[in-house]
Image: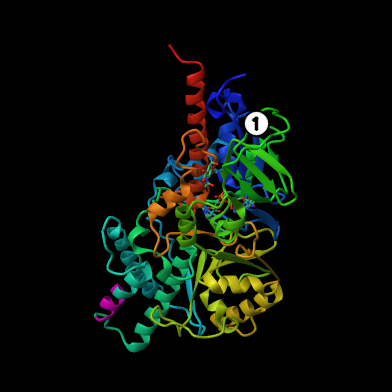
Amino acid sequence: MEKGGGKGRTPSEHLVVVVGGGIAGLGAAQRLCRHPGFRNLRLLEATDRCGGRIRSQSAFGGVIEIGAHWIHGPSKNNAVFQLALEYGLLGEKEMSEENQLIEVGGHPGLPSLSLSSSGKNVDLKLVEDVANLFYTLLDQTREFLHVAETPVPSVGEYLKKEIARHMVEWTEDEATKNLKLSILNTFFNLECCVSGSHSMDLVALGSFGEYAMLPGLDCTFSEGYEGLTNCMMTSLPKNVVLFNKPVKTIHWNGSYRHENFPGGKFPVLVECEGGEKFAAHHVIVTIPLGVLKEQMTTLFDPPLPQRKAQVIMRMGFGTNNKIFLEFEEPFWELDCQQIQVVWEDTSPFLDVKAELQDMWFKKLIGFLVLPPLESSYVLCAFIAGHESEFMETLSDEEVLSSLTQVLRRITGNPQLSGPRSILRSRWHSAPYTRGSYSYVAVGSSGEDIDILAQPIPSTSLDSQLQILFAGEATHRTYYSTTHGALLSGWREADRLISLCDSGAQQLHPKP
Ligand SMILES: Cc1cc2nc3c(=O)[nH]c(=O)nc-3n(C[C@H](O)[C@H](O)[C@H](O)COP(=O)(O)OP(=O)(O)OC[C@H]3O[C@@H](n4cnc5c(N)ncnc54)[C@H](O)[C@@H]3O)c2cc1C
Ligand SMILES: *[C@@H]1O[C@H](CO)[C@@H](O)[C@H](O)[C@H]1NC(C)=O
């Protein structure tokens, strides 16, 4: 028997519960399992599968991604890329040195085809000019990173202010000027998808440049992104991962008992919806920010410190969804990679006041052409914001019918056969996600991300590290990505490992 509670534990007695089996939770569990001090590890996952927002599904005779699509910046410093290499999940091209060196500055490529709401092909030279303007201005936002006070609060307002200055010098006729504004509107909507935000007016200007980009041409997993999280999961010892265990309340700052460890006292007790309870020394919470926003008052007992709760409220978490459409015959050329949609009555300066029912589809930015499958051709549309959340409330038939109308309109072909089937994500309604990913909202900052990531309680030394926080939203420079999520899980595992190692040192002082 050792004396003196927590400090005197032998290293193997660290009881840890990881909440959430996305890439952050799996990454944390994997790292802890490789250390002899953490043999008593449980990962509680609310649903019946691992992967969370990494979710691949067999459909249309191939594999499609409901969640994460690309490895952003696949190169040597990308943890997801490295792990995918280790597991042999990438193709020759993805692994090539050449691919890893390509720098695109985080901007998506130009569309191969741009169609307007009046059924015309938009001149691609015009689209390119507008894209150049948009991305030049977007890059300028990085200049406000270390500025005490920004000229306007949001990225959206900054872009509009600068566009207004540029417009004075536009020399085209009125119709072309209006078309340029409509194209700009599509780029604003595209940026909403990238940021997972309803509007760029909600995204803070001051911290926008803190998001870090890695070199490498974005690549995909030919067999599905979920192959990665499946490999991580199967590398864990049996019985570590428990499915269908939604955590209801994390009781902390207490003194609980564990039936397998009589005589031991544990500061944390994790209670599941079904009533099952798990006592622990430490809990790593990887619950998505959207769920924390909705449930934090019931998830933590005692409540989170006020500072932490305020940060959770003011940080940004929005929706970006995908709608997959399957066609018998493509209406596009086979070398086409992206189809842009331009609504001629829109502009970044116009606030549309209409019922969502009548205009939700105008938030669609266009379609990504997926590699053709054996007997079907698939497009993937992206849509962000409140319109995307509204889309989730519609039936498949309603969405399919609206999009068929849109396609007939933009192709100028009222006879165009619509898609033969549809499949979409619904990340806002997903009870254990409640949106897509985080962004730095107006009123928040990069510092808030660090506050969210701080373990609690932060005051007393001997009861430290009861609840630790990981997940995409806790990574200051790589938030909203899979590599950010993975690194955050490793970060919290390492925090516990150093605590364990320093404790071990006290027990067995090195000469
Ligand atoms: C549509 C979409 C497209 C994306 N595209 C990309 C992309 O191309 N590239 C990229 O890098 N990233 C992309 N992302 C972001 C990326 O998917 C996420 O950043 C990352 O997967 C988050 O991992 P995580 O472990 O932090 O959270 P999650 O994967 O959400 O894992 C959290 C887990 O916690 C579980 N959970 C929640 N509440 C509870 C509870 N109470 N009790 C127990 N378990 C609970 C959930 O079920 C889930 O399994 C995309 C996301 C979406 C939604
Ligand atoms: C934690 O417990 C201590 C001692 O019981 C108490 O003083 C403190 O207020 C508690 N902290 C919280 C956040 O409840």
Which residue in the protein does label 1 denote? Answer: 40
Place residue 184 in its image quadrant: bottom left
Q: Judge whether 228 appears above or below 152 on screen.
A: above
Q: Percent position (x, y) of residue 450?
A: 42, 48
Magenta-span inclusion, residue 165: yes
Q: Judge whether 334 appears above or below 432 on screen.
A: below
- Kindly give the residue lying farthest to the top in the view shown: 511
The residue under the point 59% across, 35% down is 281
Place residue 399 in its image quadrant: bottom right
Q: Judge whether 67 appears above or below 186 on screen.
A: above
The amino acid type found where label 1 is placed reads: Asn
Q: Percent position (x, y) of residue 264?
A: 65, 29
Q: Is residue 111 visible?
A: no
Along the horizontal axis of the image, is 135 left or right of 91? left
The residue under the point 39% across, 51% down is 212
In front: 290, or 161?
Answer: 290
Along the horizontal axis of the image, is 354 left or right of 125? right
Q: Percent position (x, y) of residue 139?
A: 32, 61
Q: Which residues are magenta?
A: 162-168
Magenta-span inclusion, residue 196: no
Q: Is residue 28 visible?
A: yes
